[in-house]
Amino acid sequence: MLYNSLISKNKEQLQQKVEEVVENNRHYAKLGNLASYIPVLTEADPTQVGLSIWTIKGESFNAGAYQTRFTIQSISKIITLILALLDNGRDAVFKKVGMEPSGKSYNAIESINCCNKPFNPMINAGAIAVTSMIKGDSPQIKFARIMNFFKKITKSDNLELDERVYLSEKRTGIRNRTLAYYMKEKNIIEGEVEAALDLYFRQCSILVTAKELASLGAILANDGVDYETKEQIVPAAIVKLVRALMVTCGLYNESGEFAVKVGLPAKSGVGGGMLAIVPGKFGIGTFGPALDANGNSITGLKILENLAQALDLSIL
Ligand SMILES: NC(=O)CC[C@H](N)C(=O)O
């Protein structure tokens, strides 16, 4: 495989490739738009592009705005899903949330299936339901548990909440409120609806970098084992489940096209981040806040497509 020969023989070649794909795809930013339904997100610089690769041997290759901080948004859904699975077990979680692609956008009003469950944990409705299952005696304790787990799984102590983005979304998140109240009526949301929404808005507003996403990706590529300490942070069976949902639902109604063009488990966020996993090899984090019509980073998609082709990365 090209990747194997690159990593063992010539690290400079891989570093060069990383820089090249960032430069070659920069211009696509012009074709996208910032997420304006969360007003503070329109303050981002749409021309920024960054890429980071973190291997399971602990090596990293970076280019462009890979250290710029942005809100994690929907990429947080995979981390809270892992925590909810650890807290409640697989049966309890999937009693309330489905495992099928919805074929609709991440905040579609048609997010609930015929059994009154949200289609999957990667769309907003499913993620809000999952977040409502996280354990803790108070909202503060629940958020502290989420934050600590985010820090552990990204191997970064620098994570913090972007208070302005959080308040901006809390004020304007009417669609998420609508979905959550409907799910409360159907007994999907546990506890108070506003408390679940508040926790969800907070988890989405945690600041990360492309490099931190790549590090998280490396742990998921390494079947849940921290590539430095060798600690099993997430059981391998949960990693498999999450990677499967990323392939089928991670990019919402663009997941099928992405599987054809790239062929990797991935998750996007409207803050401009993308995370992709190359099992057994490395994690990839990208940043580019200009989004396509489906809410996925336009430069992130192009970068991943180019990288997958150049390094023959598809797992399919
Ligand atoms: N796709 C996304 O990143 C959506 C996350 C955003 N916080 C929302 O709930 O709408």
Image (spheres, helix red, strand yellow):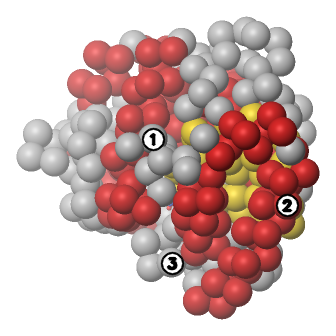
Badge 3 residue CB within 8 Å of ligand 1: no
Label 2 sits on a secondary structure element that is helix
Query: In terms of sequence position, does the residue under pointer 3 or pointer 1 come before the other?
Result: 3
User: Which mark identifies residue 232?
Assistant: none
Tag in front: 3 or 2: 2
Q: Is residue 252 left or right of residue 280?
A: left
Spatial distance from mark 2 to mark 1, Cα to Cα? 23 Å
Q: Residue at x 65, y 46 (%)?
A: 2
Q: Residue at x 73, y 68 (%)?
A: 21
* Left-right relation of 21 to 276: right
Look at 50% across and 24% down and name the residue there: 239
Kindly identify the residue that appears in the image at 85 percent across and 60 percent down. 16
Residue 110 visible within the image: yes
* Residue 89, x across and y down, in percent: 39, 13
Return the residue at label 3: 292
Q: Identify the residue at the far top of this view.
A: 231
Q: Is residue 80 above or below residue 260?
A: above
Disc marking residue 315: 1
For residue 16, which numbered disc appears in the image? Answer: 2
Residue 251 image point, x, y percent: 43, 57
Residue 139: % across, % down: 61, 30
Q: Is residue 191 left or right of residue 291?
A: left
Disc 3, SS: loop
Picture quadrant where residue 138 is located = top right
